[in-house]
Amino acid sequence: MNRKDFVKHSALGLGSLTLISSLASCEEESDKKNEVIEKSSKIIEASSIALPPKVSELFGSRGHRLHHSLWHGLRDFWDRSDKVSELAKKEITKLNWNPPRPALQWQRGGWTPLTLNGSGIDFLFMHREMIFEFDNAMKKEGEDPDIGWILIPEPGLYPEFEVPPVWELPENLKWLQRRFASVKTDDFYWSRIRWWDREFHDHSYLRTLTLGQLGSLMETSVHNDMHMRWASQPYDPVTGEAIPMGRDEIDIDVKWDSVKYDFLGETYSSHVHPIFWRLHKWVDNIIDEWYKAHETIHKGEIEKIEVNGITWYKSSKWIEVDNPWSAPSPHAHHDIETMEKVSGILFPKNEGILKDTKRSVDTKPMTWF
């Protein structure tokens, strides 16, 4: 979506709310007025940002879900001995799913991004591949795929992108509850998200970064926090029961492949949610900004190439690797049987996040952002 359409759609949404508010003001009871406004907001959201059903079904398919979950889980936790044992690594390597570049390291009492090994390139490339497939799927349905955010939405300005409320997490994750609640506030937007939005569009900053550094820094800051900021309370797609942490990471029952399960907060389901494509296109556009920033000062130092049909960049002093990793092979995400085996190794049944409340306080699902 371009800037003109973004403003136009937002204005239509605000206009609808104004009209409904005027009608509701005639009601004698204030609770009825609030109910009308709440319902109207849901209508606006459903009509203005929903994906075509066939596009939702494509990315909600088992192959896409397993691939996205494994890709993130493997590179995020490959170097965590408390999560992935040496035996598990050997078994995963036999199946050719070992990540060439882990994304995180333990440092100063917490897990921090590996910014110098090129893992950020894998992050940017894998999602650009997803966007390429998304664009083709949207065009096939006669829809405009250009729906990315130009500016990360300001609080209260765009009803269709209103931030969902926080919900209660399990007792052993109260530390995470506090962080989760903070990410959804207006203050967090103005103090952090708007700052990131400007920083990652600042050419004087972008031209100091390698592509791997850019990807790693974006993934572990604004990207992860946008996922959780716009995440809504997840529900069991069959029973409708509220599930505070979403699907247990060890559970790959086919029921979770329902398009109803589009929880933005975890990797098995986030790409089924329409917000996913808005925020990831925002991220992807910064790759182009990064290239333009370097061209003004380091003209000719970055050479464009094609990798698996995707426009990319040749390895140089600014690009750590030119063989980005998104899967063992271009068609690996169609090999459901192998991915199910890898998932069983990476997420063993005795390690489910909801099964054990005695684990250390840093415990959270490996599939959460």
Image (cartoon, rainbow, N blue to C red):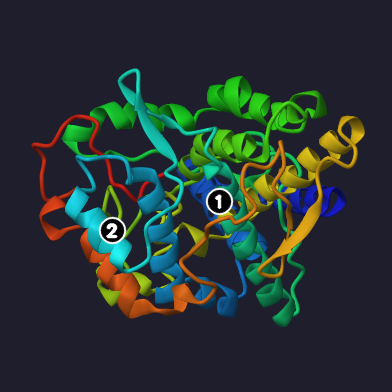
In this view of the protein, can residue 21 be seen by the observer?
no
Residue 266 percent coordinates (x, y)? 39, 52
Q: Secondary structure at mark 2?
A: loop
| Residue at 39% over, 38% down | 166
Q: Which mark is residue 207?
A: none
In this rendered view, identify the residue nearer to me: 43 or 328: 328
| Residue at 74% over, 73% down | 143
Q: Which residue is mark 2?
A: 247
Q: Is residue 160 left or right of residue 314?
A: left
- For the residues carrying marks 1 and 2, which lies nearer the camera in this image? 1
- Vertical relation: 342 (above or below) 148: below
Q: Is residue 341 left or right of residue 325?
A: left
Residue 341 percent coordinates (x, y)? 26, 71
Query: What quarter of the picture does the C terminus occupy?
Result: top left
In this rendered view, identify the residue nearer to me: 193 or 62: 62
| Residue at 30% over, 54% down | 246
Q: In the image, what residue type sits under mark 1?
A: Asp
Query: What quarter of the picture does the N terminus occupy?
Result: bottom right
In this view of the protein, can residue 187 be seen by the observer?
yes
Mark 1–mark 2 distance (CA, rounded to whole Å): 26 Å
Dot 2, how many residues are within 10 Å of its Cα: few (below 14), some (14-19), or many (20+)?
Answer: many
Q: In the image, what residue type sits under mark 2?
A: Arg
Dot 1, how many residues are within 10 Å of its Cα: few (below 14), some (14-19), or many (20+)?
Answer: many
| Residue at 62% over, 42% down | 320
Q: Which residue is mark 1?
A: 122
Q: Secondary structure at mark 1?
A: helix
Q: Is residue 172 left or right of residue 178?
A: left
